[in-house]
Amino acid sequence: MDLPVRWITDTMGGLTANQQKTAFGNGVLPLQALVALRSLALRMQSR
């Protein structure tokens, strides 16, 4: 995902473990959306 080391899990950030998991999960969504849109575009081109 190209995030800097300890970007979310740095204990100095003051996030709880649950908040860290939420932040990390939300960071994955843009990449998943990009892959999905590219996949759809390729399918539409092949028709």
Image (cartoon, rainbow, N blue to C red):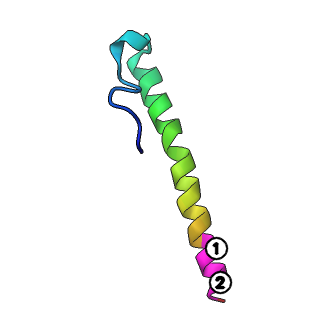
The image quarter in which residue 9 lies:
top left
Label 1 residue SS:
helix
Picture coordinates of residue 33 (x, y %)?
A: 58, 55
Left or right of residue 32, residue 14 in this image: left
Q: Is residue 45 magenta?
A: yes
Q: Residue at x 52, y 51 (%)?
A: 31
Task: Please report the bounds of the magenta region as a residue range.
Answer: 40-46
Task: Establish if 44 lies above or below 17.
Answer: below
Picture coordinates of residue 19 (x, y %)?
A: 47, 22
- Spatial CA distance of label 1 from label 2 is 6 Å
Task: Establish if 9 lies above or below 16.
Answer: below
Three-letter code for the amino acid on which mark 2 is drawn: Gln
Task: Establish if 26 lies above or below 6.
Answer: below
Q: Residue at x 64, y 73 (%)?
A: 41
Magenta highlight: main SS: helix
Q: Is residue 31 magenta?
A: no
Three-letter code for the amino acid on which mark 1 is drawn: Ala
The image quarter in which residue 1 lies:
top left
Picture coordinates of residue 44 (x, y %)?
A: 67, 80
Asked if labels 2 and 1 touch by Cβ distance under 8 angstroms, the answer is: yes
Please tell me which residue lies in front, 37 or 16.
37
Label 2 residue SS:
helix
Left or right of residue 1, residue 26 in this image: right
**How many other residues sit within 10 Å of disc 1, few (<14), some (14-19) or many (≥20)?**
few
Q: Residue at x 57, y 57 (%)?
A: 34
- Residue 45 has which mark? 2
For disc 1, the marked residue is 41
| Tag count | 2
Quarter of the rendering occupied by the C terminus: bottom right
- Residue 10 has which mark? none
